[in-house]
Image (cartoon, rainbow, N blue to C red):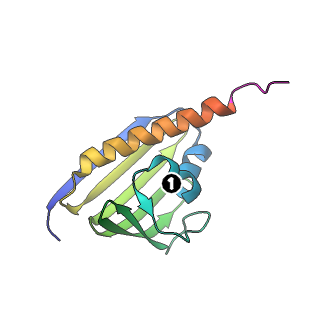
Amino acid sequence: MLGTLQQSHLRIEVDATQPQIKASLLQPGKFRQWLWPQRFAEGLPEQLHEGLVFNSYLGLVEVRHQVQQVTDHSLQMVLAGGIDGFHQWYWGDQWVQSRLEGVSALPLNLGQTITMWRLRQFLSHQNQHQNQPIAS
């Protein structure tokens, strides 16, 4: 793999509960919405689970994800291809944390910062729509 060893750790506050964050990170139907322009292979299950292997694509760069652990508060994956390393997510009420480490030619810190910003926007937008009164 060409590139340099990079590490990025980010933690943000979000306007969301632990179950909302969990769903946004583990359900492909949700994470496809906020991880754009990243694309994901077809045929993913409704929710990520341990042992699952899937590919994502950012332009021509392919990254293989192998899900190592899933709990109510965390997701850990081993990455290969465009990023050789790992990605860990941790969350609770009102916060989410991401740790990304690997060898890559991609700017991992920039990508992770954009990803966290998009997740925050997605969760905020979801909550705004849930809290709107229903017109009668």
Give the image location of residue 97, x and y in percent.
Answer: 40, 45
Is 80 or 39 nearer to us in this picture? 39
Residue at the (56%, 71%) spot, across then down: 43
Magenta run includes residue 43: no
Residue at the (25%, 52%) spot, across then down: 108
Q: Which of the 4 quarters of the picture holds residue 46? A: bottom right
Residue at the (65%, 32%) spot, across then down: 129
Whether residue 76 sits left or right of residue 112 in the image: it is: right
What's the amino acid at mark 1?
Answer: Arg
| Range shown magenta | 131-136
Magenta run includes residue 134: yes
Q: Main secondary structure of the magenta part?
A: loop
Position of residue 73 relative to residue 119, above or below, is below
Residue 73 can be seen in this image = no
Question: On the rendered image, what quadrant is the C terminus found in?
Answer: top right
Q: Residue furthest right?
A: 136
Position of residue 75 relative to residue 68, above or below, is above
Q: Which residue is mark 1?
A: 32
Q: Which of the 4 quarters of the picture holds residue 100? A: bottom left
Is 39 or 28 nearer to us in this picture? 39
Give the image location of residue 44, x and y in percent.
Answer: 55, 68
